[in-house]
Image (spheres, grey):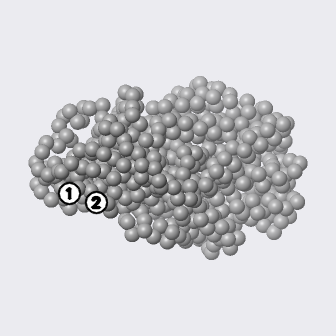
Amino acid sequence: MNIQVLPDHKLSSVAPLKPCNVEKKEVELILVKDQNGVQYTSSTIMPTPSTHGTPCTAEELEERETWGKKIDFLLSVIGFAVDLANVWRFPYLCYKNGGGAFLIPYILFLVIAGMPLFYMELALGQYNREGAATVWKICPVFKGVGYTVIIIALYVGFYYNVIIAWSLYYLFSSMTSELPWLHCGNAWNSPNCTDPKLLNGSFLGNGTSYAKYKMTPAAEFYERGVLHLHESRGIQDLGMPRWELVLCLVAVVFLLYFSLWKGVKSSGKVVYITATMPYVVLFVLLIRGITLPGAMDGIRAYLHIDFKQLNDPKVWIDAATQIFYSLGAGFGVLIAFASYNKFDNNCYRDAILTSTVNCVTSFFSGFAIFSVLGYMAYKHGVRIEDVATEGAGLVFIIYPEAISTLPGSTFWAIVFFIMLLTLGIDSSMGGMEAVITGLSDDFKILKRNRKLFTFATAFGTFLVALFCITNGGIYVLTLLDNYAAGTSILFGVLIEAIGVSWFYGVDRFSEDIERMMGFKPGLYWRLCWKFVSPTFLLVVVIASIVTSTGLSYDDYVFPSWSNVIGWGVALSSMMFVPIYAIYKFLSMPGTFKQRIAYCITPEHEHHLVAEGATIRQFTLKHWLAI
């Protein structure tokens, strides 16, 4: 056990812990215990006698688990941020929107919005040492946004785990001498199944791109062998869950549970594999990819520069939404992870490092993807644009088909699906940790029974995910993917940014960061937090709503009632913001003005409201401060 007495200038470096009052912190002892490689810290503060409220008790100064090593935290954040979208969405977006020219809006939005929001969430969680809901003790009226992002993280777990289960199913299916999607003639194939060797530009000459042709063995294995989509007439005809996928989903959920049940003590070790494995595999796939005929044509198509594309507003919207979703701000995960950091950890450096690694990974993965797409185009005598696609069609149809034609195809398939599995698992772990930490910090009974609560959360996501592995499950998954974390997550982060930057105050937030790290954020970061990032988010929210269209999956158009359900799912999380704000206002004592004051001042300053002191949020200086 180490006992450290901090000098005077460090005394303010502990975030307000509870609504108890400490006027002047004279001595702080930090007790560090090492249990199984995980450090626990607790602070004992010796206040001077105060006339305001009561002093802190031992129970109020709770111990909080911290990461055993700094690398555990960094790998967890990188593992969460680097997910399937880095592989299956960014390369195609880059290619479609002007190639190298797309990097201009992408990097611009990374610098003015992505990094500032990433930095803000890490600092917010680390200073207050709380999850996404209770962190709003800094401005109680915004606690509803904490519940919003927790609910969204839970919704995403419902369908994201299904995609991981598909990857696991493909992994098991790859463990044969001949990959099952290489030829027609299997039980799941239709009479119209076409040998890929017969497919070329002249065969497809009716305007159908190769990527959209659904009668190849690889496409039929995915849609008929895995999804059994041909047995469903639409979202109203789901059928029963597929037992093979149920078993894969059970394996995924158990893996998540045993990764999370002991908190960061267990999850911090799992990411050593799940966060690093994708990089090893991507590098191996790239080396193999560039040796294939046609690979350089694919890479040239990926990197071609077309500045005229930048005149299209949709390119800028694509760049904005991609940078936002790619970094993963707003799911409560970054706040949860950072809350287990040591108080003086340099989260500024962490934010720059991890957000940069995430974006470089997206760009790098494009080389591995497009080298293989170039090979596919060469093999079938079609253009790159005919084989280029995104999403599940890329990683479950086009890429597996390309792998099946290579020598040692079984090995390459196993390697590829291990990469998909590890990319998905650590992102799913992050989302579930946001739910568990966010609610455990708010409801202490859940914290005392973390293992049981973790199991209940994992089992709950499993039950809902069963709807996504039925014959028509892809329709449920598509609906959730579009609505559960679309406009609602953008709205949540917009309110979060306004709450921190305007109501709590950028100047006060900057002082909190200075207490942690010894230096204040520069003017650039403060301007981004107060003006640029909220404006960026507002524009993206509006664009998201304006460009919203009715749902479809290939040729299937969803019935109008399903879109109504989708918006209901989106609103079910967003409604926590206004409902909690109204509840908070009505539950506060005093006059109208006092209630407002209680709602927008940090909890540890509520005694000032009761005494009738001037509240800084009621002064013009507060709103103009930067």
Q: Nearer the viewer, residue 20 or 478?
A: 20
- Residue 203 locus on image (x, y percent): 82, 46
| Residue type indicated by callout 2 | Thr
Q: Secondary structure at mark 2?
A: loop
The relative height of residue 419 versus residue 474 in the rendered view (above or below) is: above
On the question of residue 119 being in view, the answer is: yes
Name the residue tied to disc 2.
57
Spatial CA distance of label 2 from label 1 is: 9 Å
Q: Residue at x 65, y 26 (%)?
A: 305
Query: In the figure, residue 556 lies in which quadrant?
Result: bottom right
**Residue 262 vertical position relative to residue 102 in the rendered view, above or below:** below
Q: Is residue 211 left or right of residue 194?
A: left
Q: Secondary structure at mark 1?
A: loop
- Mark 1: amino acid: Thr
Which residue: 80% across, 36% down?
Answer: 290
Residue hosting label 1: 54
- For residue 147, the mark is none
Q: Residue at x 73, y 54 (%)?
A: 417
Q: Nearer the viewer, residue 340 or 498?
A: 340
Where residue 477 appears, as percent x and y from the top left, is 57, 60
Residue 484 visible in the picture:
no
Q: Are marks 2 and 1 in contact (CB under 8 Å)?
A: yes
